[in-house]
Image (cartoon, helix red, strand yellow):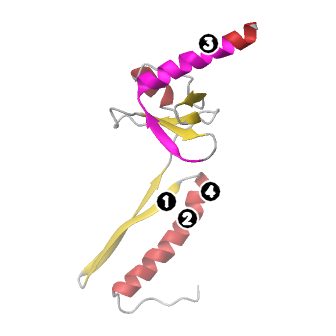
């Protein structure tokens, strides 16, 4: 490398080293499909530090998050409802995830027209799934 050592560490030098470290780690993160975030850094005249966080999600072969089936069971929803398309009050939407920390509206959806996402109560989603199943059964028998 033609780069020289930093003789005096100051705030700007610490930022430069952090940026270069982020670039070096980005290659590894891309190789393994990780999400890399530079969280924070600190500097004073006695020293400094910077922190990186690499995260990943375990997905099944269908692209469904691995924990989805277990969480759906906890909410009283069918285990296979991830990605289900159903009609709610705002139009057609698709189930994209669950947020168990949101006790009142834990089911995350995305509008089919690409508008935005909404959260719904598990009971509302369960009724909508039952309605969609009845509608599909009726259309099949007709």
Comparing labels 1 and 4, the label whose residue is closer to the camera: 1
Of the image marks 1 and 4, the number of the one nearer the N terminus: 4
Which x, y percent locates residue 94? 58, 34
Label located before the other in sequence (3 or 4): 4
Q: Pointers 3 and 4 in contact (CB under 8 A)?
A: no
| Mark 4 secondary-structure assignment | helix
Name the spot of residue 23 as percent of width and height, x first: 54, 71
- Residue placed under numbered mark 2 in the picture: 26
Q: Which mark identifies residue 121?
A: none
Query: Residue 62 occupies which quadrant of the picture?
Result: top right
Residue 136: give x, y in percent of width and height.
Answer: 67, 16
> Which is more foreground, mark 3 or mark 4?
3
- Residue 36: numbered disc: 1
Give the CA distance from mark 2 to mark 4.
Answer: 9 Å
Q: Residue at x 54, y 88 (%)?
A: 3
Q: Which residues are the magenta region?
A: 115-137
Q: Residues within 10 Å of mark 2 (few under 14, many from 20)?
A: some
Q: Earlier in the sequence, mark 2 or mark 4?
A: 2
Please say whether residue 76 is one of the residues in the magenta stretch.
no
Q: Secondary structure at mark 3?
A: helix
The answer to whether residue 19 is above or below residue 25 is below
What's the mark number on residue 31? 4
Determine the residue positioned at 49% across, 30% down.
68
Q: Quadrant of the C terminus?
A: top right
């Amino acid at each position: 490398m033609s780069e020289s050592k930093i003789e005096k560490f100051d705030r700007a030098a610490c930022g430069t080293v952090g940026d270069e470290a982020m670039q070096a780690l980005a290659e590894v993160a891309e190789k393994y499909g990780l999400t890399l975030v530079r969280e924070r850094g600190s500097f004073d005249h006695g020293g400094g530090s910077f922190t990186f966080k690499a995260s990943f999600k375990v997905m099944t072969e269908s692209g469904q998050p691995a924990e989805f089936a277990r969480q759906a069971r906890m909410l009283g929803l069918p285990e296979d409802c991830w990605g289900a398309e159903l009609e709610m009050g705002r139009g057609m939407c698709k189930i994209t995830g669950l947020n168990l920390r949101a006790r009142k509206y834990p089911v995350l959806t995305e509008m089919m027209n690409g508008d935005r996402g909404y959260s719904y109560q598990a009971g509302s989603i369960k009724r909508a799934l039952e309605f969609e199943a009845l509608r599909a059964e009726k259309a099949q028998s007709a």
